[in-house]
Amino acid sequence: MTTFFGENSFAMPAEISDDELTEIGMILSLHRNCDMSVYKSKYMKRRVAIRMRAVRCNEAAEYCALLRNCDLELDLLQKTLTIHVSQFFRNPSVFEKLRTDVMAGLLKARENDSPDPLRFWCLGCAAGEEPYSLAILLRLYFGREVRQVPVSIVGTDVDAETLKIAQQAEYNEDRLKEVSTELREHFFRQHGSRYQLIPEIREMVTFVQGDITSIEQYVKSDLVLCRNTLIYFNRPDQEKILNGIADILPNGGILVLGKSETLVGDARQRFVSVCPVERIYRKL
């Protein structure tokens, strides 16, 4: 009989119990001030199992012992739990709807209403693809309006290393799948196999490290993108985040969620749908 592994090969990690997950969470909280309780346990167990396989731990107890004695593994686990992969103009139809039905109205209202900047905020921005996509959209279609109305685009993420990548604004080609050849030539400069955004776009975006569950740190904004982020959180924290966003949006402000996300709890009474297909909502 042919086998692919020797007798001493590593077995798959045993299933992680709720109590074991709680213990891992306590270690992370103590040493990295990282609160795992806000995430869905199914998601957390799957992510922890990735690290257990990587360090060849069969049992959660063995992995807990490693965490208590290895700062590097603590860092790697935290990164595994918080990492989000994105790309430019992810779900292009969302950005098209923002262009045709949202952006012009926000810019026009601010032009006649206030000298304050129009504030766009991307929560869980990963390596910056989403806020930079907004910047490209504005520069491409609303150049005249942006010259008259100051615009602030902010991206926040919990992971400092990911934000450093965002500030460098240099990407592999797989992050540009939805970017046409024309836009690549106009807004990017190729360096070998990688593409770097031109300074004019990079300078439009500011990155800030922040925890999405710390709603007391939310800043007043006119458009908030919180896409493909809520799905990782438990229902109470989803409600907390959505109400926190509603609190910092003005009447008429816009919230954009991911395609697999929706409003929950009291937040459903605080928004009206602009486009149910694209999960775009307006604050009442």
Image (spheres, rainbow, N blue to C red):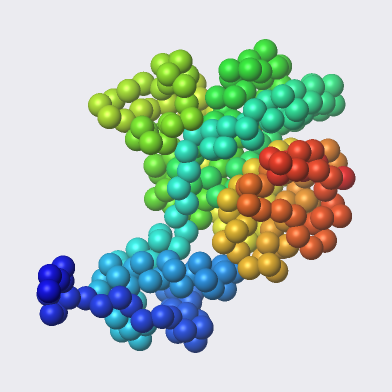
Residue 18: give x, y in percent of width and height: 51, 83
223, 204: nearer the viewer: 223
Residue 157: give x, y in percent of width and height: 52, 50
Number of numbered discs overlaid on the protein picture? 0
278 left or right of 22 in image? right
138 left or right of 56 in image? right
* Residue 129 seen by the camera: yes
The residue lying at 42 percent from left, 48 percent from top is 162
264 left or right of 48 in image? right
9, 236: nearer the viewer: 9
269 left or right of 145 in image? right
Residue 179: give x, y in percent of width and height: 47, 26
User: Against 199, is 263 above or below?
Assistant: below
User: Against 211, is 182 above or below?
Assistant: above
Q: Quadrant of the C terminus?
A: top right
- Toward the front, the furthest residue is 1
* Residue 35 seen by the camera: no
The residue lying at 47 percent from left, 59 percent from top is 82
- Toward the top, the furthest residue is 144
284, 146: nearer the viewer: 284
The residue lying at 47 percent from left, 84 percent from top is 17
Residue 118: give x, y in percent of width and height: 71, 31
User: Against 18, is 189 above or below?
Assistant: above
273, 196: nearer the viewer: 273
Q: Quadrant of the N terminus?
A: bottom left
